[in-house]
C-alpha cells in the first residue's frame, strides 16, 4: 500500500524556519509573516503552516529562544527573539 505524503508543515520544519529567520524577529513580528510562501498558496496549506509556526513558537519559547505576545483574546500573535539567545540554539 502506497500512502501519499500530505502537504503539511511539521513542527520541526517550522522550528528550522524560525531559527533561519531570527534576524527578522529582533523586533515583534506577527507569526503569520513567518509562514513560508509555499504554504500560502491555499487556505489549507496556510493553516498548516500557521499551526506549525505556532507550535514551533511554543517550543522555542519554552527553550528561552523567543518571546510570544498576544495583547487580547483573538488578537494577532507576535514573536520576538530574546536579546540573550541561549547557546544551545547553535547546537540544534
Image (cartoon, helix red, strand yellow):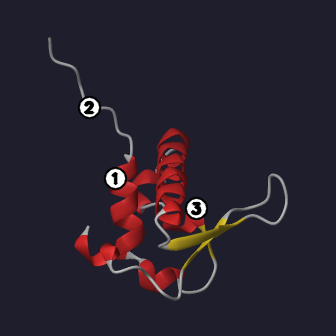
Residue 73's spot in the image, x, y percent? 83, 53
Left or right of residue 4: residue 10: right
Residue 62's spot in the image, x, y percent? 52, 61
The C terminus appears in which quarter of the rendering?
A: bottom left
Q: Quadrant of residue 58?
A: bottom right
Question: Which disc number belongs to residue 5?
Answer: 2
Q: Is residue 52 above or below residue 44?
A: below
N-terminal-most mark, 1 or 3? 1
Left or right of residue 59: residue 19: left
Q: CA distance from mark 3 to mark 2?
A: 24 Å
- Asked if disc 1 and disc 3 are in contact, CB closer than 8 Å, the reply is no
Q: How many residues crowd around disc 2 within 10 Å: few (fewer than 14), some, or many (20 or more)?
A: few
Residue 66's spot in the image, x, y percent? 53, 72
Residue ID at (47%, 44%) = 45
Q: Residue furthest top?
A: 1
Q: Which structural element holds mark 2?
A: loop
Indicate which label's residue lies in the foreground, 2 or 1.
1
Residue ID at (41%, 77%) = 21
Q: Which structural element holds mark 1?
A: helix
Q: Is residue 27 above or below residue 57?
A: below
Q: CA distance from mark 2 to mark 1?
A: 16 Å
Q: Nearer the viewer, residue 4 or 20?
A: 20
Q: Which residue is mark 1?
A: 12
Residue ID at (38%, 41%) = 8
Q: Nearer the viewer, residue 72 or 5?
A: 72
Q: Which residue is mark 3?
A: 32
N-terminal-most mark, 3 or 2? 2
Amino acid at each position: 500500500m502506497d500512502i501519499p505524503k500530505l502537504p503539511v508543515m511539521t513542527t520541526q520544519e517550522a522550528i528550522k524556519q524560525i531559527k533561519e529567520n531570527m534576524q527578522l524577529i529582533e523586533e515583534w513580528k506577527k507569526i503569520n509573516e513567518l509562514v513560508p510562501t509555499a504554504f500560502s498558496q491555499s487556505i489549507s496549506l496556510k493553516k498548516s503552516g500557521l499551526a506549525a509556526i505556532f507550535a514551533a513558537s511554543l517550543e522555542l519559547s519554552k527553550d528561552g529562544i523567543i518571546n510570544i505576545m498576544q495583547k487580547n483574546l483573538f488578537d494577532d500573535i507576535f514573536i520576538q527573539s530574546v536579546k540573550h539567545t541561549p547557546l544551545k540554539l547553535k547546537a540544534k
